[in-house]
Image (cartoon, rainbow, N blue to C red):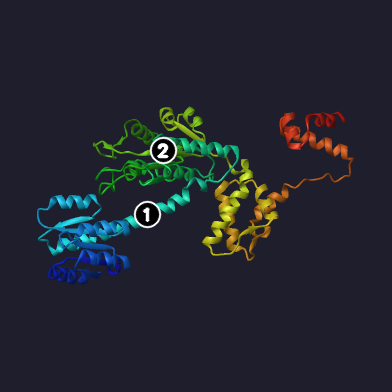
Amino acid sequence: MEQTSARLLIVDDDPVALDLLREVLSKEGYEVVSAMSAEEAISRGIENFFDVIITDVRMGEKDGMDVLRSFKKTSPETAIIMITAFGSIDTAIEAIREGAFDYISKPFKLEEIKITVRRALEQRRLLRENQYYRQELLEKYHSNNVIGRTPQMLQVYKTIARVADTKSTLLLYGERGTGKELIARNIHYNSRRSDRPFVTVDCASLVETLMESELFGHVRGAFTGALQAKRGLFEEADGGALFLDEVGNLSLSTQAKLLRFLQEYEIKRVGGTENIKVDVRVIAATNQFLEPLVKSGNFREDLFDRLNVVSITLPPLRERKEDIPLFVIHFLQKSSEENRKPISHISPEALDILTQYSWPGNVRELRHTIERAVVLSTQPIILPEDLPKKMLEEVKGKEIQFPEELLPLREVERSYVLKVLRETKGNKKKASEILGIDRTTLYRILEKG
């Protein structure tokens, strides 16, 4: 528990008050150190760390304000509680302005002291957790962790940079596993809202009958089973962002409520009459284009227009194969650290298989593949046999199949050129690029027949 490990420093030139506070707070389970002057307190602070300091303001040559200023420089995490003479409100205000956690007026009540110390320790704990959590999020979702150098991804980066610190509604397109949530989090944690909640909603998993209640909350008695009022996810995300994944799955009635929020920035709980103002940035995502749903009447056109203020399309991994080695290195390092296995390399053969594979599950599938290989591998390097069997079979099936009968080279050459032309729908420029020849050579080969 926080109490049993907390170290307190009490500073007072009155030995009676000092002994009383030391006795009371020791019984609360704290480790208590005392000092009878500001100079002694500052000296003790050089040698030790204190979670909380309780100091009288009026002492000798140096006073409690000197203690406050000294510790704010050397130990800004320490919470400092000032004890002031009754009515010295100006001193109390000055102390708060200079960073004191709180002040208590004399004559004080021991229960007030105990409560204030508990509050100070709780605030320190929350600040510590928030700093750790925020740093973890920034490291995880920093732009450096959005991997890719293909032209499509460079365009994504540019858009992120332009929209991150705005309030604009965003619509992310991309197949499952392309990293839509990662991009949404990256946008949020690079915005001025980064210290506020980022709430995710998988619209595809919401039961239609409870969809509106989950998003907007409900009042007591709104429906059978609503035994008490409940805040919805919009209220939970107040001040931050709400990520609506698979937004195309929302029912039409929920779409109407979402549209109203985007117009008025207020919601109404299910069964309620009160309009509740909420400040939420909406980032929506879908793995299907919404225009066909609009045409079929399954998605509101006015809502689509509101969501589609800025759209970002994430390309599937099969269209950005140059990025696969970058992902492999990133996931290999991460999985090796997490699983405490000294695997830092992948064989060229294994990397070639990963590059040729079609990746229907996109980046998510690649991440799971590398993690599986790291866990199962008995070597310090990832080899082809560490990869899933389906990948080996698919890539092997892609190997060039030669005709069984032996034919002159010119016939095989022309036959393959015709195949490439069929695949490119007669586009000779694209066919030449695939074949690695100029168009003059292409025409020469075709004329041979």
Please give left or right for residue 177 compared with residue 239 in the image: right
Residue 53: x and y, percent?
Answer: 24, 62
**In terms of image quadrants, where is residue 306?**
top left
Quadrant location of the N terminus?
A: bottom left
Q: Which residue is painted at 25% across and 53% down in the image?
A: 99
Mark 2: amino acid: Asp
Residue receiving disc 2: 165
Along the viewing direction, whichever of 338 and 284 lies nearer the viewer: 338
Residue receiving disc 1: 131
What secondary structure is found at the residue carrying circle 2? loop
Quadrant location of the C terminus?
A: top right
What secondary structure is found at the residue carrying circle 1? helix
Residue 228: x and y, percent?
Answer: 25, 48
Along the viewing direction, whichever of 201 and 320 lies nearer the viewer: 320
> Is residue 293 shown to the viewer in this render?
yes
Along the viewing direction, whichever of 432 and 300 lies nearer the viewer: 432
Q: Which residue is painted at 46% across and 35% down in the image?
A: 162
- Residue 336's place in the image compared with 318, above or below, is below
Q: Residues within 10 Å of mark 1 (few under 14, many from 20)?
A: few
Along the viewing direction, whichever of 62 and 108 lies nearer the viewer: 62
Residue 4: x and y, percent?
Answer: 28, 69
Q: Which residue is painted at 40% across and 38% down in the image?
A: 282
Mark 1: amino acid: Gln
Looking at the image, tell me whether mark 2 or mark 1 is earlier in sequence order: 1
Q: Residues within 10 Å of mark 2 (few under 14, many from 20)?
A: some
